[in-house]
Amino acid sequence: MEDCFEIGGKTLASRLLIGTGKYPADGMIPDVCGASGSQVITVALRRVDFASETDNVMKHIPDHMVLLPNTSGARNAEEAVRIARLARAAGCGDWIKIEVISDQRYLLPDNLETTKATEVLAKEGFQVFPYMNPDLMDARRMVDAGAAAVMPLGAPIGTNRGLRTREMTQILIDEISLPIIVDAGIGKPSQACEAMEMGAAACLVNTAIASSSDPVSMGRAFGQAVTAGRAAYLAGPGATRTLASASSPLTGFLGQGRA
Amino acid sequence: MGFFDFWKTLDPETILARIEASTEGDVLAALAARKCTSENLMAYLSPAAAPFIEEMARKAHDETLRHFGRQVLLFTPIYISNHCVNQCVYCGFNARNRIHRRQLTLEEVATEAEAIAETGLKHILLLTGEAPGVATQEYIEESLALLSKHFTSIGIEIYPVDEEGYTRFVAAGADSLTVYQETYNAGLYETLHPAGPKRDFRFRLEAPERAARAKMRGVNLGGLLGLDNWRRESFFTAMHANWVMDTFPEVELGISLPRMRPHAGGYEPAFVVDDANMVQIMTAFRLFLPRAGITMSTRESAFFRDNVLPLGVTRMSAGVHTSVGSHTEEEGSGQFDISDERSVAEMAANLSARGYQPVYQDWRMV
Amino acid sequence: MMVNGSEERLPGVDMTLDAFLKHKGIEAGSVVVERNGDVVERSRFGAVLLDEADQLEILRFVGGGA
């Protein structure tokens, strides 16, 4: 049976989402898209720099890719909402990843502001993907606010430290009915595989691919890792039996005494 | 969406069939699973799990140690009225039973409360039959106020009321609601309750969520084991408990395993639930709901209660009398016969001897 | 007027947003514009007349964020 990834009103074949930041050359992006199999790519919104001749990243994003603009730069809900509305005006769809970061040291997201922005934007018809620090109560609030998914960080942005938030992320996967997309901190394909084996719906990987010495190959590896992890999750773990010790059985009393 | 809507999606025949069709492989998969799913629970409740009871017990023991340590909360029930208009075929208080009907005056409630408080207990469960015209909500509220003077945690096991009623009970001092659905099998439920307001299956089923909305702190559920196939009954009980936990995450959830016992009416339970079955049910509950409390009442013998301690019991009644006014007077007609007649002091000593700490007060409202 | 935080002279009278972007060498389809706090629909670039007191934010998608 086909494993369909339904999210934000679309059906996708790949559970790997990628980014556009930190590439040595934006020209690599189409090859990374192809090699990784990813169908969703994030972009940021910035002021046009009139002084320099900067290339338009949009020229490098293949037409079939679904755009997931992010609100990077926003330090509070109001700014995130403003960026989201502008992003939508570009006419590339109504998906928006909410990134509200007022912590410049670690780039950790502000869950409270993120929830506020989620509520406003969901009411305006956006498909909202909030990036958050995994906390069950906050995730529940984001669900109630109308999010399309929840995106817990695996580790702080850019650290490539893997699933440092494993326990909390696992709780979200267990308890939240929306797709859980592990975002940030995934440094190796094995970590993306692990996130999928845990039951995550998808992974978003940017730094690990873009900063690799061979982004196209690394993109391919991540695509394969996400596929493998998902297949393993669906297949279910094999049964291992723990042998009960013979001393003092807990149920030895059954069969003695009165019924 | 209330629990009734979820309950409607569970077909009792299909569920029993799936439980009974579980294989040894399914049980092994459940024992290996990181988190117990509903499918795993079905395997745990199946005939195929019988040879694995020791393993289930070990796993349940580990879970219990981690979540509850070696502590057991002691409490006792106080029956303040056995008037009842229902005719539940299995119950000693059945309106058609010729028993002495008694309702304590508020003065008598106070006297009983004092006697119970002397034993050191701080948790109490207040019970009535279903006779709202006699044991009125006002009477219950006044009794709660009296009990509040002596006890820091008061549960109620009374006829279902509306949300407004539960709000008033909470204000009067109730912090937990015990309501057993008896059976989640609606067809069987109808035949077991030929007359009286208890016939309203849905109103009873939705009592826990009304209480939760009324800010009742704790809710205790259970099916009366023996009425219907216990495998199915336990599955539905667990589904109800799980739903309440999901919908009201702040509510403290407890499960009981009341097993049918002889009583004045003489109802013969349709299904036999032996000790091994009880252990299977209890460990399955513990594994599916690691943080739910499990109550073992004095319907069970001292021998059985003592031996299932390591398997997940977190609350036990002690010094129990199920007739009205019987903490101070002669034993009257009880709701069910007690098997474990040990007093609070005896229970406490027994627990300590077995390496468990008896707890009298878990918390108090300030 | 203010454009992306810097002061700029309006290059001419009766200048539409569309014409202004052309003047700056920017492809209208590659940017989004916020004028005095409001998002301007792309379809209206040719209709909106700029004013000396306007505050414009002209933005485009770039690689990055996370």
Image (cartoon, grey):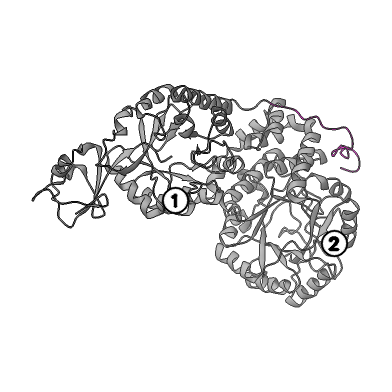
Mark 2, other Cα within 10 Å: few <14 / some 14–19 / many ≥20:
many
Please indicate whether residue B19 sits to the left or right of residue B317 in the image. left
Pointer 2 chain:
B
Pointer 1 chain:
A
Mark 1, other Cα within 10 Å: few <14 / some 14–19 / many ≥20:
many
The residue depicted at 79 percent of the width and 34 percent of the height is B55
Which region shows up in magenta? A239-259
Q: Nearer the viewer, residue A97 or B48?
A: A97
> Up-down: is B285 above or below B165?
above
Disc number placed over residue A171 in the picture, else none: none
- Residue B186, image x and y in percent? 61, 45
- Residue C42, image x and y in percent? 21, 42
Please indicate whether residue B66 sits to the left or right of residue B198 in the image. right
Q: Which residue is mark 2?
A: B319
Q: Which residue is mark 1?
A: A114
- Residue C48, image x and y in percent? 15, 49
Please indicate, yes or no, whether residue A205 appears anywhere in the rendered image: no
The residue depicted at 86 percent of the width and 42 percent of the height is A259
Query: Which residue, as the protein is rendered here, is positioned at the far front?
Result: A51
Please indicate whether residue B35 sits to the left or right of residue C3 in the image. right
Count the marks: how many?
Answer: 2
Residue A240 counted in the magenta span: yes
Circles 2 and 1: CB distance less than 8 Å? no
Q: Amino acid at mark 1?
A: Thr
For the stretch drawn in magenta, the main secondary structure is: loop
Q: Nearer the viewer, residue B286 or A92?
A: A92
State the separation of the CA atoms marked 2 and 1: 54 Å
Please indicate, yes or no, whether residue A226 appears anywhere in the rendered image: yes
- Residue B243, image x and y in percent? 59, 47
> Up-down: is A163 above or below A101?
above
Q: Amino acid at mark 2?
A: Gly
The residue depicted at 63 percent of the width and 73 percent of the height is B138
